[in-house]
Image (cartoon, grey):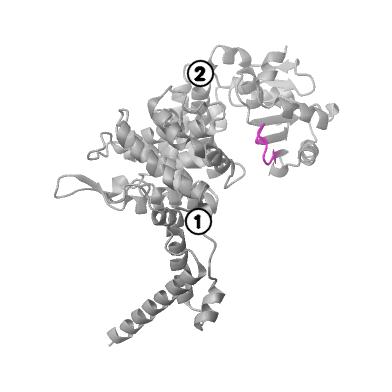
Amino acid sequence: MTGYSKHEEKSGSSLPLISTLREVLDPALNPWLVGGAVRDQLAVKVCHDLDIILPDNAKKAARQIADALNGDFYALDDERGMYRILIPGSDQADMIDISRFQAESLEADLAMRDFTINAIAVRLHNPTECIDPLNGRQDLKDKILRPCRSDSLRMDPVRAIRAARLSLGFNLKMVEGLPSRIRETAPFLSDVSAERKRDEIFKLLEEPRPATAIRLLDKVGILCELLPDVPRLKGVTQSSPHTLDVWEHTLAVVSRLSDLLDLFLNPDMVLGDGGNLTLGLAAGKLGRFRPGLQNHFVERYNPFRSRRGLCLLGALLHDIAKPMTRAVGSDERVHFYNHEVKGAKRAMEIARQMALSESEAAALSSMVTNHLRPRYLSAEHPLPTRRNVYRYFRSAGLSGVETCLLALADFLALTNLPPDQEEWTRELERASVYLEGWFEKHDAWVKPVRLLSGADIMRIFKLPPSRMIGKILSRLQEAQASGEVNSREEALELAKVVIADQRCEDKNDRLDQP
């Protein structure tokens, strides 16, 4: 069968990498490009990952590619001949998966795959040669999502999640009977490893319409199997200024946050193009932080999962404890006292159930803990002070940047209506101060270089090692960040005050003892 055209091949972002692979791999190995890489090229979409299969010697081929591209080599399943290469810093494709045929022939391998649009193979060294035994190319053209076999989902229940992602990502209509098969398959997701479900959730959140994808998962009965806490948000009403229940509000937060991330992270997005007044104001107030935000989100807690996906998972879980904390006060208003604290604990539990790394779990929990902080300041200080910025990032850490964006999305999702321009401008100005602190004044406002070390304090004031030293250093650093202390001499004077206060406190504690 004829392969894809030269236009189609040039449309995908992975062409330079594919050309490199042709040079690296021996044609005698008979490698074929398959799955999403071919599908995305045919659909003229950006291709992030490449999948290559070959009759044998998959490990040898993977090693050759890793060595040639200075990539990191991972054995996914040595027994089945499945390997992965991660290319650090690549803007062409994040990962290359190499595997040997999982059946006696290429055609049989393709027939065992999930959907026809993923069961197309193109010979790596001859892109005009294409194997498409199930007419996946026609299904892609006709916008149809069709399983390769009637029992495709039962063979691998995680394909039920993938069906939702593909139908939205490529605007495909599910073939008759597929939605009911997805519902029937949902209970069997409990047999799938946490790691595989997690990876599909991240891919789904990284799609252009993540909130719509979550709705679809709920509609076909999958969401309650993946993240049972989230559907429980339905019907949990809130007082003004909220006009949505917690479920609708949460999905709106995910949607608004996705818009903001697109605005600042998508290189094709033109800032301030006037297409959307709300986003236009955001571009005007925060546009100068775009390079910093892009660099920040390029860095990953885990090489296989994006920071963007984790940020959107944080949005999905930010109010996860509201059902368990809802109360009606004497003022007849609904309150959710400490929902961010209890929610952070639950988010940590969910992160571990999903087999996220400890750094990812900590970041997720931090986003939930701190999502209210950027917005709530005193009436006397409507904009954050340097001390506010220091204390915020001391609590939120590295994830404080994405939490600022989450807080903006949280504000936008109070209702389904466009925000009041004056209020939105004020929210953006607050966020701007926090981002200025992180990206432009980090060494002054967030983590100033110490004017005195612990050793200096012990030597000058003749103090033994103790917790008091840590308290002094903490107080000094906050004073530096706030601008209260600007020299070594001022640091010494403040240290004297802290020591005197601590000694007085210790003395009072002793007097209070019976």
Left or right side of 452 for 416: left
Q: Is residue 35 visible?
A: no
Query: Residue 444 — which label?
Result: 1
Q: Which residues are magenta?
A: 83-95
Crowdedness near tag 1: few (<14), some (14–19) or many (≥20) residues, C-alpha within 10 Å: some
Disc 1 is placed on an element classified as helix
Q: Is residue 335 above or below residue 205?
A: below
Q: Is residue 502 visible?
A: yes
Q: Residue at point 42% right, 31% down?
A: 211
Query: Residue 172 — which label?
Result: 2
**Image quadrant assignment for residue 471:** bottom left
Crowdedness near tag 2: few (<14), some (14–19) or many (≥20) residues, C-alpha within 10 Å: many
- Label 2 and label 1: CA atoms lie apart by 51 Å
Please state the horizontal and vertical placement of residue 192, each as a whole percent of the image: 53, 40
The type of residue carrying mark 1 is Ala
Q: Is residue 98 above or below residue 437?
A: above
Q: Is residue 174 above or below residue 88?
A: above
Q: Are marks 2 and 1 in contact (CB under 8 Å)?
A: no
